[in-house]
Amino acid sequence: MAEELANPPCLIVADPDVLIRNGLAEYLRHCGYKVFEAATSDEVIIALEEGATSFRAMLVDAELSGELNAFELRIWVRGHYPGVDVILAGNVDRAAKAAGHLCDDGPHLQRPYDPESVVAHIKRLLAATRR
Amino acid sequence: MGAKTILLVEDEFIIRFTLADFLRDIGYHVLEAGDGREGLDILNSGQSIDLMVTDVHMPGGVDGIELAEHSKMLVPGRPVVVCSAHMSISECYPADEFHSKPYILPALAALIESLIGDPWQKSSQTHLA
């Protein structure tokens, strides 16, 4: 645990919507992870190939765009980085739930706050931008 | 009181991550945007932001100068630092400061601290709710 806190495990959050991506990444940072935020599958691949770090998992929106779609990306990651779990989520509620599970396995011993509050926060921000 | 928040807008993914990671390590709370449109979304979301650092030339139709103008329209007193390899501060109105690229992390950190203080110093900035 001490080693994890000094050198936190890395995750990737890949979502085309910056407010969802920020919200999920922020939550996972509070859980003790180092988090790369990617907007496209191209950025995910750059992170894996040039990030100079090893990743434990990635949380990927099912509608992620880029040269590879989310499903193609999962196949590519399994082939090139079999140690990295790819978690696909179809909406923000499921993504937050998955983030909660990642948090349970994370470097910190307890969740900083409930994943449902992440969803509520993200939905408030999205509503503000669409007024 | 939480740490001061910086909105960082940079389209080069690895550079953005490196900058954000550095700023988090020295204590700031960092919101990342990958282009000008994402920067606008974050500014318009009403989150409390103490300072914006933005690249100038980015894909997506909104450049760093337009983003600086929008930030100043929303919160006139919020400092903006623009970063470019090809411009000078005189070309970057209404930005408050200019950082020449490539990024020099300690210099950028010192510039940020000169504008908003250290990460935990109480802010006089008025934020959106």
Image (cartoon, helix red, strand yellow):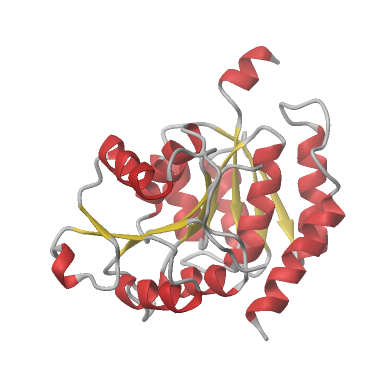
Q: Residue B88 location, x and y as percent?
A: 13, 63
The residue sitting at 53% across, 70% down in the picture is: B43
Relative to B27, residue A24 above or below? below
Instruction: Choose top left, top right, bottom left or bottom right for residue B93.
Output: bottom left
Instruction: Choose top left, top right, bottom left or bottom right for residue A122.
Output: bottom right
The residue lying furthest to the top in this view is: A2
The residue sitting at 38% across, 41% down in the picture is: A50
Relative to A61, residue A9 above or below? above
Compared across the picture, whether A49 is left or right of A124 comes to left
Q: Residue A123 location, x and y as percent?
A: 76, 70
The residue sitting at 83% across, 55% down in the picture is: A117
Quick check: can you spot residue A112? yes
Q: Residue A2 location, x and y as percent?
A: 66, 13
Compared across the picture, whether B95 is left or right of B88 comes to right
Quick check: can you spot residue B8? no
Figure disc tally? 0
Relative to B4, residue B81 above or below? below
User: Quarter of the image containing the C terminus of chain B?
Assistant: bottom right
The residue lying furthest to the front in this view is: B124
Between A50 and B43, which is closer to the camera in this rendering?
A: B43
Q: Residue B78 location, x and y as percent?
A: 44, 63
User: Quarter of the image containing the N terminus of chain B?
Assistant: top right
Between B99 and B10, which is closer to the camera in this rendering?
A: B99
Between A124 and A10, which is closer to the camera in this rendering?
A: A124
